[in-house]
Amino acid sequence: MFINNIKYYPLFFIILLSDFVCAQNSASGRIIDEKTTKPITGVDIFINDSNKAALTTNSGNFSVQSDSIIYKLKFLKKNYSLQSIDITSENNSNIFVKLSAEKVGDIQEVVIHNEKPKYKNKKENPAYAIMQEVWKRKRNNGLEKFNTYTYKEYEKIQFDANNLDSTFMKKKIFNKMDFIFDYADSTASGKMGLPIFLNESIYENYGENRPDKKNKKLLVAQKTSGFQDNQVITVTAKNLYRDINIYDNTLNYFDIGFPSPVGTDGFSTYDYNLTDTISVHGERAYRIRYQPKRTEVLAFQGYLYIDTDSYAVLGATLKSTQKINVNFINSISTELEYDNPDDETFLPKKFVTAIELTPFAKKKTSKSIIARRSVDYYEYDFNKPLDNKVFVRREEEYDDKFVDKDDAYWAKARPDSLSKTEQGVYEMLDKLKQTPKFNRIVKLYETLGSRYYNITKGIDIGPIFSVYGFNEVEGSRIRLGARTYFTQNDPWRVQFYGAYGFRDQQFKYGVEGKYMFNRLNRFMIGVGSRRDILQLGTQLTDDDGIMSRSFASSTVFARGDNTSLSSVNSTNVFASIEPWKNFQVRVDGTMQSIKSANPGGFNLMYYRNGELRQTVNDSHVTVSLIARPGAKFSQTGVDRYEHGTLAPTIVLKYTRGIEGLFNADFNYNKLQFLFYKPVLVGSLGKLMINFEAGKNFDTVPLAIQNVIPGNQSYGLVPNTFSQLNYYEFVADTYTTLHLEHHFNGKILSYIPLIKKLKFREVAFIRGAYGTLSDGARAMNVDGLRYSAPSDHVYFEYGFGIENIGIGNLRIFRVDFNWRGNYLDRPDISKFGVKAGFQVGF
């Protein structure tokens, strides 16, 4: 309930733009020896600040192309001095390069191994000795060594449509929008590349290590081409990227672990080959080529540049293999540059990552999106006193003035000026915003991403995926809802839905309003009311919110008859505040009445003071402490979007039932705890951990008791027990643990034929233990039916196959579940198959 699925929204953007598609620039000229004027061959040519040669010449003439603007070329050949030339639109052809011989005294030993040598063991490999020195002198981020530090970040994210051709450009979808192709450039293949999105951000970073450790990253400016008011699209772009440290053993891309070529266990994944020693920004460096031993695994190939004296990583290139097994991704490439101020530390200098995304095919000629992100780290300053006010959150930081910077500000703030192509993105999108057809396309994406359709200013209808449902009590169920939505930073929101069941012929509804008084600490109040048919017992640590998800319509296809539905009338009032970043305190006051929605098939009757009753009247106050350390959010309104991270979720809840308040029947005390965390386990994949524990300190009827969550549907429902029936286990005191490990195809990639299908394996085990008092059993009329897993831990286990599909569209998953014990119970399922869509990378 507390986990936001916004990280999956980028996939809607990819599918929507699957027919769109990287503008390249070129430079050409001639290279000669300055003294003899004769042509020179075998020259390595580097584009911009890349550490990887784009071309090694085989004649005196050269021609290079790049996906991005070329602003500098570097020319390097053994025994010659490094030559660097600035490139502009006026001098990108007929370039005349003169290389001068390097003085003998400046040349260090050069080792060349262009072929892939074979060694009996890794200790014979010269690269192994070099990497041992790197590991021995493993560096830490230099920011840790200073008492205080400040620096700036300039982030630029650009999406380019790739592999356009004349047939594509003549499609009807571009009627009245064909002017966009005036901004396209020809690529080397003769097709067209078109920039379609540009986002620029400037951050100021402050940190203190001593006497207290604290840091702050402040967004001071942001500019987005054509989508300044569409935060879903901006989050789509930023969600593709994670910060990485090349010295770590595991690198995080899309919350998937890739083994680092600089990691201490790199030789178990990669083959290394010392190819040369070259000059990198004036420093002599070993150039080591690395490639994965097996191309079917998630790994990179590329070059490492290691300082010959200090064994520091000066730079690295990482490029995915052609057989990369990540949904919607054709390729990944990253270029890293580091400064090394001393023998123990490094400082990030520039990171550039390019991701090619396609929704269907992995062919090189497929229309795709090239998503490129570059980050410059600059203006480092150390050991200067910082006022404590710098680290205190201020309300003005949470308004949206960071998008109001003018062109003069950006011209001064950028470390480098925008290229002509990048400037054209802003101009083109401004024109597109005036085109009705383009606005309809954007609206479609917004609808898919937010699940709401805007019908007029300030009013959305939805969620669109909840319109139809089915259950045993209501039969076919129609649900229509709406919400207010004026801007992405609305301080208030009202939501409403109405539902009708054609079998019980009853109308249901839910309405909730909330208002945020302060963006700094997100102080918010809300009130809501609901009358509906609900499937209770599908969550342990549930949400008191009126508009939280209902499972009433989740049993369109199910094993057995689900008659255990409840009729709930509830009213909720809440207040919440975030006194510290990513730490929320919420207080809920709830008044509810609960009875069986199907008295003939599901009995909620209980005894109170010797009287038989069928409706539970409950009034309670809940205090929730919710921590999300490391989580990242966008925008500052009453609702906000969450960036994809590996942040944990930690929840502690105390509930106090108050007898007599609004005719409530019971005093009771309940304490609950939840911990959820995805963990990257090196190259072995990702482990999902979900632990819950709780205790009812008083005797309460079944309607407000703890129910170990079952799942009788054939769909995938997280943190439920697939082979349990609803209400099979009920507990005063409980603990549950769900472990689910995604191996990312590491095992299946060893199996011939199977590995071509690119399936990925999942293994899981689930366990629950609890106790139920005799008093709780005696209170309920059907109490003898209910028991807790107190004899021993109930457990389930199984495996799943995910990544099922075709091409890059692999979003189907099938799980095979076995019940581990309590097999002598009637009407149980010992084995079951669950299936569903799992939208993710």
Image (cartoon, grey):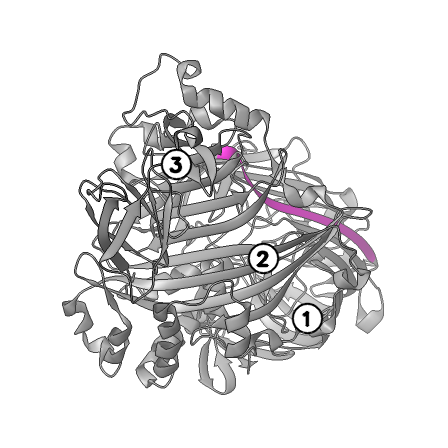
Q: Residues under labels 1 and 2: Cα distance?
A: 53 Å
Q: Position of residue 142 (x, y in %)?
A: 64, 42
Which one is in front in this view, the residue at disc 1 or the one at disc 3? Answer: 3
Q: Residue furthest left?
A: 167
Tags 3 and 2 touching, CB below 8 Å: no
Residue 639 shown in magenta: no
As drawn, the label of residue 602 is 2
In the rendered image, residue 205, in percent from the top left (x then y), is placed at 65, 58
Q: Is residue 369 above or below residue 497?
A: above
The answer to whether 186 appears left or right of 296 in the picture is left
Q: Amino acid at mark 2?
A: Phe
Amino acid at dot 3: Tyr
Viewer-side label of 1, 2? 1
Contact flag, marks 1 and 2 (Cβ < 8 Å) = no
State the residue lying farthest toward the top: 120
Q: Is residue 837 visible?
A: no
Numbered mark located on residue 303 in the image: 3
Badge 3 or badge 2: first in the primary sequence: 3
**Mark 3 or 2, which is nearer the eye?**
3
Q: Is residue 672 magenta?
A: yes
Instruction: Give the magenta part as a residue range.
Output: 668-682
Amino acid type, residue under disc 1 in the picture = Glu
Residue 89 percent across, percent down from the top left:
30, 66
How far apart, in angstroms, are the residues tagged by discs 3 and 2? 66 Å
The residue carrying mark 1 is 397
